[in-house]
Structures are given as C-alpha cells and as structure tokens.
Image (cartoon, grey):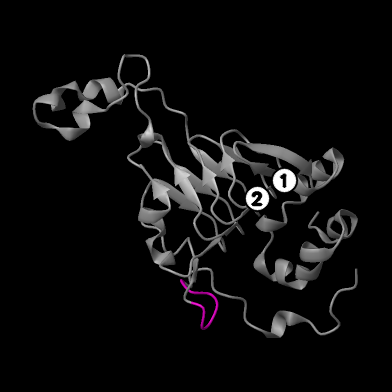
Amino acid sequence: MSEPTQPAAELAVTDPSTLHPMPGQPRVVLLKPLVTSELIEVGEYSYYDDPDDPTAFETRNVLYHYGPDRLRIGKFCAIATGVRFIMGGANHRMDGPSTFPFSTLGGAWGPNVDLLMDLPQRGDTVLGNDVWLGYGVTVMPGVRIGHGAIVAAGSVVTSDVPDYGIVGGNPAKLIRKRFSDEDVKRLIGIAWWDWPVELITEHVRLIMAGTVDELAAVAPR
C-alpha cells in the first residue's frame, strides 16, 4: 500500500472541538463537544449522523439514562442515524406478579420507590475505539462493543461484541472477525487511535486501507 507522495500535513486537521466537522453538512456532529451529561464520556472525533437533528443526541438517542450507569464511547467511532442506547433506567422488576413501575407515577405510590432503586445494575455501556454502528442499531444496557467492531444496520446488541468482530441480527450474533486472533492482538497493541494526530495524519492511508504489517511498521516503538 503506497502512501501519498504529497503530504497532507499542509492542510489543517479538523479541530476535535468543532461541532459540525463537515462544511455544509449540519447532519453530522462530533459528539465530544456536544454532550453535556456527566454520565456520558466520548473520545475525540467520534461522530453521529442524522438528517433531522443530530444535536439532540443526548435526549433522542440515549434513553432512560437516570444513572448511575454511564455511556462510554471511545475515539473515532462512527454512529449512524437512529442508533439508540437503552440505559439501565429502563429496567423493571420481574420477580413479582406485575412489572408495572407504580412508584414512578408518584402520589400515594411514590413511597415504594425503593422497589425500583434496588434493581440489579448491569454496569456501564461501553464502545471501544474505531467502532461502526450501522443505521438503526439498538444497544442494550451494560453491553461492551470491542475496538474495531462493526454492528450491522437494524441489529439489537444484547451481549458483548469482541474486538474487531462483525455482528448482526436480533439479537446480534457474531458473523465473522475482521482479522485473525493474532492480528487483533497486534492491532490492540498498535492502538493507532492513541497516536498523536500528526502521526495519524501522516499515515491515514495505511490506517484506512493498509495491512496490519504495514501499520505495525510505522507504529511508535
């Protein structure tokens, strides 16, 4: 894989604090400068694409987020239109005759709120770095989606996705791994997403279309 003969360093790299990184495309937002909730963490350059209102991500795409579980999104993640993160606040009791959450309606039922507060927590929902979530994906509470993973459009992710796995369906199942187990270990060690942005820019063609060997050859020692 040949690298460009004319370096791109002369062009400015997009500032990760820019809300709309694509001129003339308000449908795309970088999430790190957008989110305000202390329960959501986002790495640099992860984006959401929505032709309606991408700036409503926190309220329209992260649902039932009452805490304490957190949504943690890594760097360089691509999140397509309609992706939904169902957080732990959506949980209901299932051990009694009814699943109806009476105490949430307040009034005379309010004092029974302890019956909801002691529900088991599934933990944080975590996206690794360089994750691609396709159109209309639903991610259930407490799921970890590994680095470099791809989730097919319309999938419902109910369990963890391995690093560099491709999953799809409802519930989402592993279709295949993008690389061998050995190369996955190498890619995790290379961790290009943690490189200085200047080094990423210099080798962006290898990151996008090179081989693991080629990427390893230019990785910092």
Look at the image and give the residue range highlighted in magenta: 19-25
Q: Is residue 22 magenta?
A: yes
Residue 144 higher or lower than 26, as above or below? above
Q: Residue at x 40, y 58 (%)?
A: 35
Mark 2 → mark 1, Cα distance in angstroms: 7 Å
Q: How many residues crowd mark 1 within 10 Å: few (<14), some (14–19), many (20+)? A: many
Q: Nearer the viewer, residue 6 or 90?
A: 90
Badge number at residue 185: none
Horizontal side of 61 relative to 110 (left or right) equals right
Q: How far across and down, in percent of the image, does residue 204 sit? A: 75, 69
Q: Quadrant of residue 146?
A: top right
Kind of residue indicated by mark 1? Ile
Horizontal side of 165 relative to 183 (left or right) equals left
Q: How far across and down, in percent of the image, does residue 22 sit? A: 55, 77
Q: Nearer the viewer, residue 17 or 34?
A: 34
Q: How far across and down, in percent of the image, does residue 213 sit? A: 90, 55
Q: Helix, strand, or loop for circle 1?
A: strand
For the residues labelled 2 and 1, say whether their Cβ atoms are less than 8 Å apart. yes
Instruction: Please give the residue where the numbered disc 2 appears in the rendered image.
Output: 152
Q: How far across and down, in percent of the image, does residue 83 sit? A: 51, 53
